[in-house]
Image (spheres, grey):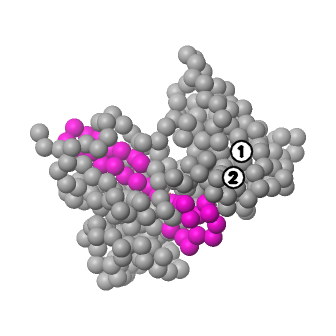
């Protein structure tokens, strides 16, 4: 039996809905979704397996002009995913007003076929959708163009059908039962990071990194220890909150999601630690998995 396989990269500005679209395409919650920009920091693979094909999706950090070391590393994950791709899915928000020149700049250097996804059409009118379709057809002349709502899974199937037509005949790249290249430990740290993004404001989420320091799997329970890294004492105080209230909230919500994800009881303990300016320090970026 013939088998198709290919790499599909989702790229675009922060907050346009790349992670939501990938989760809809993969049919699993792979990538964290929050209302804040720059939630995704790594390149995250989501793999769809059927007997006759394997599609390897990459969700990538939103494309920006980097301001600090961490953002530079985030952009190198984007570049890597463009080089590998059999298909590039360029996601744009229908209501995006500011320009997409940073993204278009990156797309210029690739030879892979591009599909444009105009997302969040649930927040728009038919007329405006038509205008945007014409605009992107003219601007990029892509191989295909779709108007979708990733959130409501509207027209996502058409994107999937396009991908299936495009990917080449190839043996599978990963085991046929693999869902991702990331470990349980990684997803557990992402669950905590998602709670931090949802519960705190301003610079706190962007200054935070989560390190899983211990991960013990026992028969009926996983015992997990995590460090929440911030850049300043003031951030540490905010994270912990009065009488530890806020941190407790993070812990409770995170533990519930972990138990759901792992289908197992979880004991979670967390410590907050200050590492001044970690986002600009090469040795820490390396240690935290953002650099080779
Ligand atoms: N109304 C509407 N909202 C959407 C849709 N798709 C995504 N969103 C919302 O847009 C926000 C950002 O979604 P994400 O999927 O995290 O966006 P992203 O492009 O991965 O963001 P970064 O990680 O910053 O690159 C979330 O609040 C989503 O719920 C959609 O089709 N319609």
* Label 2 SS: loop
Q: Is residue 157 visible?
A: no
Instruction: State whether residue 26 is above or below residue 122.
Output: above
Residue 52 is labelled as none
Q: Is residue 76 left or right of residue 109?
A: right
Q: Residue at x 63, y 37 (%)?
A: 212
Residue 196 image offset from top left, x and y in percent: 68, 49
Q: Label 1: which residue? A: 228
* Label 1 SS: strand
Which tag, 2 or 1, sits closer to the chain's start?
A: 2
Instruction: State whether residue 182 is above or below residue 286.
Output: above
Pick the residue in front: 134 or 178. 178
Pick the residue in front: 83 or 256. 83
Question: Are the two marked residues, 2 and 1, in contact with CB atoms closer than 8 angstroms?
Answer: yes
Instruction: State whether residue 55 is above or below residue 253.
Output: below
Q: Quadrant of residue 153?
A: bottom left
Q: Label 2: which residue? A: 208
Q: Which residues are magenta?
A: 45-74
Q: Residue at x 47, y 59 (%)?
A: 77
Instruction: Tell me the distance, in whole angstroms, between the alpha carbons under discs 2 and 1.
Output: 7 Å
Q: Residue at x 33, y 78 (%)?
A: 140
Q: Is residue 55 magenta?
A: yes
Is the residue at mark 1 in contact range of ligand 1, meaning its CB lies under 8 Å from it?
no
Q: Is residue 115 left or right of residue 222?
A: left
């Amino acid at each position: 039996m013939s088998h198709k396989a290919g790499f599909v990269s989702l790229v675009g500005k922060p907050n346009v809905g790349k992670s939501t679209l990938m989760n809809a395409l993969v049919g699993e919650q792979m990538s964290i979704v929050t209302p804040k920009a720059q939630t995704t920091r790594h390149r995250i693979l989501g793999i769809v397996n059927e007997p006759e094909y394997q599609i390897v999706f990459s969700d990538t950090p939103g494309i920006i002009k980097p301001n600090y070391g961490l953002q530079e590393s985030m952009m190198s994950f984007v570049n890597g995913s463009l080089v590998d791709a059999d298909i590039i899915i360029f996601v744009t928000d229908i209501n995006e007003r500011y320009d997409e020149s940073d993204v278009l700049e990156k797309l210029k250097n690739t030879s892979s076929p591009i599909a444009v996804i105009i997302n969040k059409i649930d927040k728009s009118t038919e007329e405006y959708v038509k205008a945007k379709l014409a605009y992107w057809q003219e601007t990029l002349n892509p191989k295909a163009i779709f108007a979708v709502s990733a959130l409501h899974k509207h027209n996502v199937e058409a994107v999937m059908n396009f991908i299936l037509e495009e990917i080449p005949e190839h043996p599978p790249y990963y085991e046929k039962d693999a869902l991702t290249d990331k470990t349980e430990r990684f997803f557990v740290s992402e669950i905590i990071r998602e709670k931090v993004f949802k519960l705190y404001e301003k610079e706190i989420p962007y200054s935070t990194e989560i390190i899983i320091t211990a991960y013990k799997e026992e028969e009926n329970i996983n015992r997990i220890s995590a460090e929440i890294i911030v850049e300043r004492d003031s951030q540490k105080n905010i994270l912990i909150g009065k009488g530890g209230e806020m941190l407790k909230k993070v812990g409770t919500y995170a533990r519930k999601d972990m138990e759901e994800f792992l289908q197992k009881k979880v004991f979670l303990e967390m410590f907050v630690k200050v590492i001044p300016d970690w986002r600009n320090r090469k040795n820490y970026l390396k240690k935290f998995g953002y650099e080779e």
